[in-house]
Image (tube, rainbow, N blue to C red):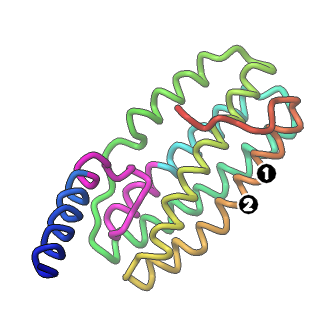
Amino acid sequence: MRRLLFASVVGLASGLLVQIGAARAEPATVARTVPKLLVQASLLSNYEIAAGELALGRAEDPRLRHFAAQMVAAHRHMAAQIGHLAFIYGVALPASATSANQRSSLSSLAAAPAGPAFDQAYVLAEVRSHVDAINLFSTYSIEGRAPAAVDFAVHSLSTDHAHYTKAERLWESMGAVATVALRR
């Protein structure tokens, strides 16, 4: 009787796990392998560079222009590290510099009128992008197996968390609502 009950519970639990697993797709910013880490990190860094360059020319607030210059410099450095790791691990980086969602975000930024509207759009895009980066690097920092890639993820997590904190403070200082809905 116990075996039958145990088998029924295990069968029910297994079926439930299969259904849960099938219903839930892993987000793009979760990386458990070196190729996925490097591809997603490359896309994120390229986005940060492009958005920062756009902000350098369009942001009204001098604090945002300073922040944008920091993002461009930091993410160019990160892109060089990603390229080095891609060479070491034999990973082909994407031909397209950014993902479709990132291109859409960049188009929206480019279409925003210069001044406060652009400034708020840029800072919100930075908060969202750095949430994605934190998710990416924290997952690989914990679950990654390749030592050099783990070191990169740990360092990048620290850097991108600092970027997120700066972006969040900028958002709050602009008079925007401090609790941001990060849904896209």
Residue positioned 64% across, 32% down in the render:
54
Q: Amino acid at mark 2?
A: Ala
Instruction: Choose between 121 and 68: the one closer to the eye.
Output: 121
Can you say whether 145 is above or below 21 in the image?
A: below
Residue 123 drawn in magenta: no
Furthest residue in direction bottom, as rendered: 147
Q: Residue at x 33, y 56 (%)?
A: 93
Q: Magenta part of the protein: which range?
A: 20-43
Q: Distance between the Cα atoms at labels 1 and 2? A: 6 Å
Residue at image position (60%, 42%) is 128
Element type where label 1 sits in the image? helix
Question: In this view, which residue lies farthest toward the front?
Answer: 1
On screen, residue 30 above or below 89: above
Q: Which mark is residue 166?
A: 1
Q: In the depicted view, which residue is nearer to us: 172 or 14?
A: 14
Q: Are marks 1 and 2 in contact (CB under 8 Å)?
A: yes
Q: Position of residue 171 (x, y in %)?
A: 80, 37
As drawn, 23 above or below 10: above
Residue 96, image quadrant: top left
Q: Which residue is mark 2?
A: 162
Whether residue 155 is situated above or below residue 18 in the rendered picture: below
Q: Tell me: 119 left or right of 128.
A: right
Type of the residue with mark 1 = Lys
Residue density around tag 1, few if under 14, some if 14–19, many if 20 or more, within 10 Å: some
Residue 81 screen position, x and y as percent: 50, 68
The answer to which image quadrant residue 156 occupies is: bottom right
Q: Secondary structure at mark 2?
A: helix
Task: Residue at 28%, 60% (x, y): give it.
Answer: 92
